[in-house]
Amino acid sequence: MVSGSYFSLAVLFLGALGFGLAPLGLAWLWARVFAPPKPSAIKNAIYECGLESRGDAWVQFRSAYYLYAIIFLIFDVEAVFLLPFAVAFTGLTAGACLAMLVFVLLLVEGLVWAWAKGVLTWA
Amino acid sequence: MSFTETKAGKFEGWNRPPVIETSDDGELLEVSMGPHHPSTHGVFRMDVALDGERVVKLKPVFGYLHRNHEQIGQTASYLQMMPYTDRLDYFCSLTNNWAYALAVEKLAGQAVPERAEYIRVILAELTRIQNHAAAVGFLAQDLGASGTPLMYAFREREKILDLFESLTGSRMMCNYMRFGGCRVDVSEAWLNAARKVVAGVPRFVDELEALLSSNEILLARCQGMGVLKPDLAVNAGVTGPMLRATGVNYDLRKVDHYGIYDRFQFRVPLGEHGDVYDRYMVRILEIHESVKILEQALKEIPAGPIMDPKAKLRGFKPKPGEAYGRIEAPKGELGFYLISDGGTSPYRYRIRPPSLVNLTILEDMCLGHNVADVVVIFGSVDIVLGEVDR
Amino acid sequence: MTNTLDQIFVLLKHWIMGLFPVGLQPIVGIVLSVVAILAVFPGLFAFSVLMERKGLGRMQNRIGPNRVGPFGILQPVADGIKALIKEDVVPYNADHIVHFFAPIVLVVVVFMGYAVLPMGRNMTFVPMDAGLLFYFAMGASAELSVFMAGWSSRNKYSLLGAMRAVAQMISYEIPLLMTSVIIVMMTGSLSLDKIVEAQNHYTWGLPHWYVFTPMGFAAFVMFAIAATAETNRSPFDLPEGESEIVAGYFTEYSGFKFAEFFLGEYVAMLSISGLGATLFLGGWSAPLEALNFIPSWIWFFAKIMLAICGFIWLRGTFPRLRQDQLMNFAWKFVLPMTLIDLVVTGLWRFLGEGWLRWAVCSAILLAAYLITARMGMRSKKLGPRSYRYAE
Amino acid sequence: MGVGEGSADLGLNSNIDQNLKIEMGKQGIFVTTIEELYNWGRRSSVWPMQFGLACCAIEMIATTMARYDLARFGAEVFRPSPRQADLMIVSGTVTKKMAPQVVRLYNQMAEPKYVIAMGACAISGGPFKQGYNVLKGIDRYIPVDVHIPGCPPRPEALMEAFMTLQKKIDGQSLTGEDRPRYHDAEATGEFPVPEPGEHDLEPSSNPLVWITPVVIR
Amino acid sequence: MKTVEEIKAAIEAAVPVARVEIVPNGSPSAEHSLLIDAAHGFAVAKFLRDDAELALDYLSNVTGVDWLDKEIVEKVKVTHQVSKTVDGVEAVVEETVEEARKHVVPGHLEAVYHFYSMKFKHGPVILRMRTENRSDKVELPSLTPLWRSAEFQEREVFDLFGIVFTGHPDLRRLLMWEGFKDYPLRRDYVEPDDFEYEPTAHDEVLARAKAHQNREQGSGNKDQ
Amino acid sequence: MLGEGLLKGLAETAKNFAGSFVSKERLITVQYPEERHPLPEASRNFPFLVYDGADWEAGLRCVACQICEKECPPKCIYIEKSKDKKPDYVGKMQIYPARFDIDISVCMSCQICVEVCPFEAIKMDTEFELATDDRFGGLLQDRKQLAKSNEYYHAIHPTEASEVDARLAEEKAKVEEKARAAAAAAAAKAAAPAAPAAPAATPSPAAPKEGEGSQPQ
Amino acid sequence: MIVFAILAALTVAGSLAAVLLRNTVHCALALTGAFIGLALLFLRLDAQFAGFAQILVYVGAVAILVVFAILLTRGSETPATGVFSRTWFAGLVVAAGVFAVLAWTVLHSAVALPHEFAAPQVSVAQIGNALMGRYVLPLEIVAVLLTAAMIGAVIVAMHEKPGKYEKKEAN
Amino acid sequence: MTPLAGYLLVAALVFAIGLAGALTRRNAILVLIGIELMLNAANLNFIAFWRYGPHPEALTGFLFAVFSIAIAAAEAAVGLGLVISIYRHLRTTDLDEINRMKG
């Protein structure tokens, strides 16, 4: 049953892939037959408000993005632990719930620290 | 001076834009915003350097709509320039007309009949209402509202444009005022239509305010944004709602007593913080005040001629001399400086555009803010490129 | 009769399957379901685009598209044909491979999410024990496609848009997960089918939807906010905020690749609406016991479309937030609220049956909301102002 | 040299009964041939670029607003990026400083693309043509499909122009001599961008699209 | 508010080295202006801004004006020493002749500033400064350090008239593109030859169009 | 409280959404090609030349005085005077325009030509559906295209037209009065026969009809 | 078996690409592919929860972290100098050696290794119960670790924010 | 059904590739990517052994893998944080260069 469901997923994957690719193929075919693409230096230049693009877009970004990503990662991992807990929650003892509360609070502490430290202030 | 320091950084010297220290974290991203950009209100361009999303350098670039207006003014006759003034600030052709007519009347010493003065006031205030409504709508558009406030603003603007069209013949380029009066007379039916439109304005403003004024997103994005200090504003020659939003009480309708504004009871709303929200609110409140003026003017308008009988359309040659006429246009002080050498066309025809001068401190207001805020601050200045570049 | 109607698609599928040899039947069944998913939701996408354009129009005192086909219903078809025949411009400087795959990854990932959504009674494509986790695993991958699109274009606006989008999506992913955890705690299962089943009971004819519990309601509001942000919809449409960064991460996309982003966005919106309906609004269960005769799938799609209407309504009304406000909102309001909600949900169980837990939980949540909201507003001194006048 | 490719498709194919076709499109009857489907798709989904230059831009905005509602034609999707836009409405004065940008934007649009020159300034420089910084008509550099006179044209006039454009699209064929430029593998896909020089734009026009009419007198 | 004469007196008192001249205005507006020598313009302007009574805190308008070289024909009585042979004797005789002498008054560029006071709500006070000539000595002091509002307006005057404002922090072209060589608002500016064709063929336009066509054809031939 | 303003905004859009189904005020779209927003009487777009009577060429009021050409701000009017003369509406021999072109791709619709015209010969049209793909052929209007009858003028600007007609009739009456007076004076002087009065008298029967403006000659 | 081969190939190809490609962002995207392959292998091993968790954490979060890190260090451009270290050969040898040893061990013990077991039915509830029961201590430790890692990573990666807008002290 | 050896071989291969990457790449981020691969290979081993182990219902290997995922994620966060920090100071992520700079 389990592998059967994976097979379904695989079919869905292939279907979605086909759904994504088919129109692109069709468009490509259309272009091949009727509207030959004519790329050229100006047309295929980077758009920048009608001006020639100055400098590169691939510059070094700011670490603020990274900080958010770290906190996100940690909470994502937390969710991985929270979900089994939540599933089992209805049958758990108060002690177990307390343990989870401690788990959550530990992470919240990290969040609060980050908040206080100004990590969550997007400059 | 109190404004040598801002939230964003420190001013270098007396009245230069602040110098923002860039963090060494991340590189600067140099972006040109404009001339084709959805929210530069035309073909304005800002060369921006971004530190993350924070703007650390901003250089406005003008001239993408420089249509040699002043040069044409030196070759065309005085009358011929009237339709060109329509195309300066193309939202407010009638106030442009008035400013130009005022300057020429000053230059030639012409009188304007009373009825014409009333008509001028009515049209100017209607213009102010539709300009402010559109400005608020565009500001909301810059804030990212998907058109709804702008649609409402234009809904109201269309009503006013209908009035303009039925009087002057054109929706936008009215070419209505003449030296010494106005071109055609208003009919009683028109006045009634105008009364109806004016009566509907407060309801529309309430609607717009319900949509925007207390919206938390708008509050968060506008309050404390692009703060302009009064002394810098004065020094930079900022005029109009932008100046009054900083708290400086300077309204040419009250200061210069031009036209017949002395006869009307109205107040000048003043801001306190000089931020985007104040500019927005001052515009909203000015609409209310304009409605008051309009109600009085529409009630009191006398009968009489609309043109000075001595006025001349063709072959108009003022004596050599010069005059600077200015009015309170919806965007600020609109001045015309004319030098006559006695010929049929001015020797020098100069426009003092409020939009251009109001942009002087764009850099100061924007530095240190987000890209998104730059768009909003820029929108709150309310410029029209036709006037900036001329 | 009601039952037949309710199961009409299931029956239809089985009937068609019966036409094939026994060995092929499971495969045919799967293919049929896949085809159904790939037909229904793009169709709904077209419909919701049209609805959005018309609905926005109505909100703005105008009519909206009404000339292409009767009442304009062929508008999306025309748009599709147009997109198909548009030239595909890829900047020379772009990273061609990544640029090509970004929209496809988005479309694939978005469609994968539908595998676990129960679209009606017995109408889940893959009923899975860890269905919710699967959904989020797929949802998390969408960020990558956005990044790919923005980065590969090598356009400043694209890259800014992509960075914004990724930052925004990761920030709101957490509240989305946490609100789901709340529902899972109440149900005791990650399976979406079980979650719907758990809500498909009635007291006095009224359903046991989770939205009708204090923490469920709070979670629903947070979920709605996070879902709006996750799908980059107004007022959280910063990644494509055209007044700032032109068209965001798909600035450099043309032709059908752009259409696929468009499609991906809407299909994701439909899918997350479906998830929201499943988690909080009882999925395919009827809102009143008396209305149970109406087929379950109608209820599911009705709820999705209702959610889409909500999205359109928001879009027609609100201006856009700014990046820092958006992030602050996620981390300093939505996340704390969901965490508090999480704790409250734990409390709910231990308070036992009765009115007390309703009162206590509601009070805690209300207090939490007031405190967090006030803090946010006060720290920046936001609020209406009064103005002075000069005579 | 002959007639440039851009101006080859300027003639309207008047043989086809346009009204009938519009009626058919309205009633949702699917036209059968691929060409007609193609033309129907193109004409029913013309997304303009969010591109305003001057006074006319305000009337263009007014056209999209509630009173006139260009959205009825499915054209309210003003795309800010040229890649996704089909129609460039040159709405207002093109100055010499702006002209290179306009041409570049036009180049960056994906085919098929159309241009409407809206208002006197865009067509010929209009009232400002006597000046030193105003381009005397955008058709010196890019092929214009529809001109709307007026200063500024009324919103209705823009809509009429839009419908004229739709008719024009309907009249185009996929193959054959009168096919549009982008169906021709030989034709150029790009229009040279003028450079701002010391006194004027260089070159002052694009011979592919602009053939100077001979002064008669 | 003070009259122009009073202001002149005040300036002379405060900045004694400055030369101030009243330029009368013939129009009914009667806004007379003050002509300040460029060397002390900045000091005078600073005085005007900081003076407690005037407090001209608001610079409204900056205008550039181009006054062309004027050819003035005047009749001058000139006394020549002419050597004449009078009665066979060469003698130097003084002779007075009336001669028409052409004499060129060199033109100048002028910057006109309109000041107001927002504090006292009075104005305008009009200040003019003139360059020495129109070609090489075109410097004027910039008032941007005193009033920010002059920043773009002075840049515009620089762009269109070519007045170089010394002390301006960012004197670049404002309206025309970088690399543009001319000053288009000067009265002797020659516009680029871009009238190729005019359907409404007015004579002067037609002449330009024809000239353009001839030139195009000429260059076309050359290319071939 | 947080959220209150948001809810207020939502209520506002909801009100408009619902209102659009019931109230004309909340659905202001005028569906252009089928419905039209009525143009106000004063509306103007491009100039046209008024002619009286049935023959446009003979009935043109324009006397090629070239005032409008001179006063036109964008210089879009081009007039060539005729070599010969023809009688005008009062019968005075007048030069007429051999060529009268208006380049509406330049015209800025300012109405100054109308204001300065001493002969009520040029008026503003309200026609705006002029979109064309032919820049030079479609937008340069010659005098044939420009000539529109007085009835047309009455149809688009009734009030103004009747005022104009009244004024013309008055003028004409004045001229006739003068002529009559002159004739009377001449007769009174009783010297030579009424040679000067003759040309003025000949076309006079047509005049009253024209003054009423209801009947063509 | 075929499925396994495909998945194994995907995983190995992904990892190889992640290690070999020149463009760093491509490496990161290939790494994502490898992670997906591994997740699918987990699914193949009936560890549904682990598989989805793998996708959620690695594809959804770690990959984002990696690409952010690349953009933050301007690593998206291929360096002009070689992409491999000067000691690449030694590294390769070591890696090959390690693989040889491992493969040898695996293949030699292959006979002893189990071949077939009934698929264990592991529900998420069981995992939850186990997690809250026997493994509650590791769970808390993981929480501490995560918090510590978060704080540590933030401190390391964070730029000194407070001093940003102020003039730097002369030092 | 695939024998356990197959999974172990794949894990070994991925581990070796990761090791090779970590040892041969210059870019510090790619070195971290290699390390991530090695950790994941270990995860695969855990899961495989759990699946083929005598007591799959005890969940030991399974949970070990889950914990390992968490720890590897934390490792990635800290590791990449370090890379960023180093980059900020030395303006490079090239390990060879970093070595040279450190002397």
Image (cartoon, rainbow, N blue to C red):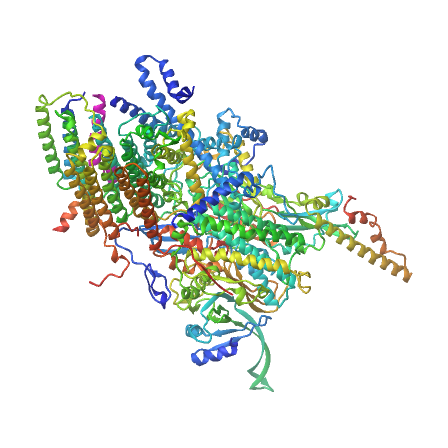
Q: Does the segment drawn in magenta span residue B219?
A: no
Residue D204 at what x, y percent from top left? 48, 48
Report whether C286 appears left or right of H47: right
Main SS of the magenta part reads helix
Residue E18 in the figure: left or right of residue C98: right
Where residue E213 appears, as percent x and y from the top left, is 54, 48
Query: Image quadrant of residue C149?
Result: top left
- Tell me residue C8's x, y (percent): 40, 20
> Is residue F87 something that shows in the picture?
yes
Pick whichever, C234 or E104, lies toward us. C234
- Relative height, residue C10 to residue D108 (above, below): above
Q: Which residues are magenta?
A: G1-28
State which quadrant residue C207 falls in.
top left
Viewer-proximal residue, B168 or E88?
A: B168
Q: Is residue E81 left or right of residue F82?
A: left
Q: Position of residue G20 (x, y in %)?
A: 20, 36
Of H103 and B328, the residue lying toward us: B328
In magenta stretch: residue G4: yes
Outermost residue toward the right in this view? F190
Q: Residue at x 55, y 30 (%)?
A: D26
**Exactly how many numbered labels are in the figure?**
0
When the figure is inspected, residue E18 is found, relative to residue E221, above or below; the finding is below
Residue B178 seen anywhere in this rendered image of the structure:
no
